[in-house]
Image: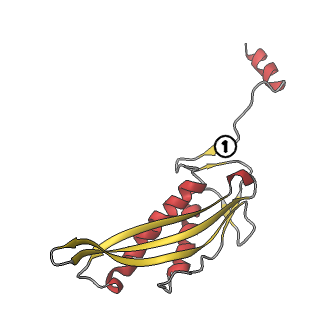
């Protein structure tokens, strides 16, 4: 029986899937070896001066931690580029006397994903994530903590849409 299977495999009757899977949910074809994350400029109306660098580094770190891909400055097999398009606060949970009990910080990012080994997987999408905080607090007192949480959500969503192919 083994000889028959080897013989059939030699005639191309068995096809193999060319997708590698990892325990992190990534499904990357074997020909993909590298990635590049380009700087995400901040084009939002309200500017957080550190957000561009934080966004860029958070996505790079996510890809390094959860894939076996090597990072390149430019021209990677997978390329991520885009811009921060929104950084806004708005009142939430209006209570008695038209006072907001909470304020919501929302960050929006437009991302262009290019798969140089399989252009059919290329896309451009906008991702948004938010965190709420008590309206008695001023944004600057909680901003750093909120941005870390929001960037984690954004990078998870970008990862899932590209590498995990969800």
Give the x, y percent position of residue 165.
58, 50
Quarter of the rendering occupied by the N terminus: top right
Is 139 situated above or below 95?
below
Is 68 situated above or below 14?
below
| Residue at the limit of the structure toward the right, as seen here | 11
Give the x, y percent position of residue 127.
51, 64
| Residue at the limit of the structure toward the front, as seen here | 98
**Residue 88 occupies which quadrant of the picture?**
bottom left
- 76 or 41: nearer the viewer: 41
Q: Name the residue under label 1.
A: 19
Q: In the image, what residue occupies the spot 49% across and 85% down?
A: 47
Q: In the image, what residue occupies the spot 50% across and 59% down?
A: 157
Give the x, y percent position of residue 72.
70, 68
Crowding near the residue tagged with mark 1, few <14, some 14–19, many ≥20 C-alpha atoms within 10 Å:
few
| Residue at the limit of the structure toward the left, as seen here | 96
In the image: residue 22, left or right of residue 98:
right
Q: In the image, what residue occupies the spot 73% across and 60% down?
A: 77
Q: In the image, what residue occupies the spot 46% across and 78% down?
A: 87
- 34 or 114: nearer the viewer: 114
Tally the marks: 1
Q: What element carries label 1?
A: loop
Q: How is the image coloured?
A: secondary structure
Give the x, y percent position of residue 84.
54, 75
In the image: residue 97, left or right of residue 142:
left
**Residue 32 occupies which quadrant of the picture?**
bottom right
């Amino acid at each position: 029986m083994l000889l028959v299977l080897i013989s059939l495999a030699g005639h191309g009757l068995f096809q193999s899937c060319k997708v590698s899977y990892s325990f992190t949910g990534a499904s990357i074809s074997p020909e993909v070896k590298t990635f590049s994350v380009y700087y995400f400029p901040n084009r939002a109306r309200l500017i957080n001066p550190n957000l561009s660098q934080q966004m860029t580094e958070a996505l790079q770190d996510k890809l390094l931690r959860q894939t076996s891909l090597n990072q390149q400055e430019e021209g990677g097999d997978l390329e991520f580029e885009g811009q921060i398009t929104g950084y806004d606060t708005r009142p939430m949970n209006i209570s008695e006397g038209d006072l907001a009990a909470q304020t919501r910080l929302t960050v929006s990012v437009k991302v262009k994903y290019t798969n140089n080994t399989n252009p059919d997987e290329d896309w451009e999408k906008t991702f948004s994530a938010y965190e709420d905080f008590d309206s008695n607090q001023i944004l600057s007192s909680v901003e750093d903590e909120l941005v870390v949480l929001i960037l984690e959500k954004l990078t998870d969503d970008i990862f899932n849409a590209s590498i995990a192919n969800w």
